[in-house]
Every structure is written in C-alpha cells, then in structure tokens.
Image (cartoon, rainbow, N blue to C red):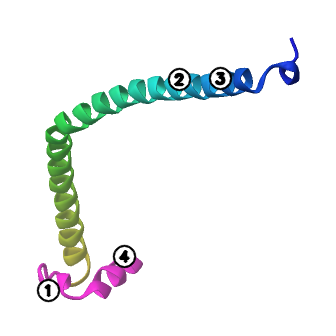
C-alpha cells in the first residue's frame, strides 16, 4: 500500500488519526507522571518534621563545637573567655601558637 496512491481524504484521516493517537499517548504519560508527582509531594509534605528535628540537633552540635573552640582558644592564649568572640583574629593567633 503506497501512501501517495491514497485519496486526499484518506490521507487526511490517517494524518489526523496519527495526531490523535500521539495526543492520547502524551495524555496518558502525563496522567501517570502527575500521579507520581502527587505521591512525591505528599512524601515531601510529611517529611519536614523529621528534617527540622535533624536540623535542630545539628545546630545544637554546631553550637557546642563553637563553644568548645572558643573556650579552648581563650584558655590557651590569653586566658580570657568571652572577649575573643568580638575579635575574630584572636582565634587565628591562638591557632598559630599551638
């Protein structure tokens, strides 16, 4: 069967039929992907409490580390704790002496 030998009406019907088929396939794929995105959105919506708790613990650990570094920098160099937080270069000087 040669496409050029078909009547123009048959060629148009075939062309529109193929377009309709592609639209149906694209719509089906879009519908499936939309369902997957919906599931992922629900997972992300229920996930933030776990993340915020982990971030809170991380912040606490970072603060403990900073306090430990400040206290060790203050006792090793000048013996002053608290004043070196205003001067960022004191920690660098203490580190270079150690």
Q: Report the magenta residues as a range.
A: 79-98
Q: Mark 3 or 2 closer to N-term?
A: 3
Badge 4 marks a residue whose secondary structure is helix
- Mark 1 or 2: the one toward you: 2
Using the image, tell me which numbered label, if any, was put on residue 95.
4
Within 10 Å of disc 2 (Cα), the crowding (few <14, some 14-19, many 20+) is few
Task: Return the x and y of residue 84 as percentages of the image width and height.
Answer: 19, 84
| CB atoms of marks 1 and 2 within 8 Å | no
Given contact means CB atoms under 8 Å apart, are the residues at marks 1 and 4 in contact?
A: no
Give me the C-alpha separation between circle 3 and circle 2. 18 Å
Of 22 and 92, the residue lying toward us: 22
User: Which residue is depicted at the point 20% across and 63% down?
Assistant: 68
Q: CA distance from mark 1 to mark 3?
A: 85 Å
Residue wearing tag 2: 25
Q: Is residue 95 magenta?
A: yes
User: What is the number of the mark on residue 13?
Assistant: 3
Among the 4 quarters of the image, the one containing residue 72: bottom left
Q: CA distance from mark 1 to mark 2?
A: 69 Å
Nearer to us of marks 4 and 3 is 3
Dot 1 falls on a residue whose secondary structure is helix
Which residue carries the number 1 mark? Answer: 83
Please report whichever mark, 4 or 2, sits nearer to the chain's N-terminal start.
2
- Ranked by sequence position, the earlier of labels 1 and 2 is 2
């Amino acid at each position: 069967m040669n496409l050029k030998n078909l009547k123009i009406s048959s060629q148009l019907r075939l062309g529109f039929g193929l377009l309709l088929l592609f639209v149906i396939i694209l719509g089906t794929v879009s519908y499936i992907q939309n369902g997957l995105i919906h599931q992922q959105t629900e997972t992300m919506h229920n996930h933030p409490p776990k993340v915020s708790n982990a971030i809170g613990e991380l912040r606490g650990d970072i603060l403990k580390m900073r306090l430990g570094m400040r206290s060790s920098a203050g006792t090793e160099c000048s013996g002053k704790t608290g004043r070196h937080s205003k001067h960022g270069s004191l920690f660098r000087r203490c580190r270079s002496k150690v």
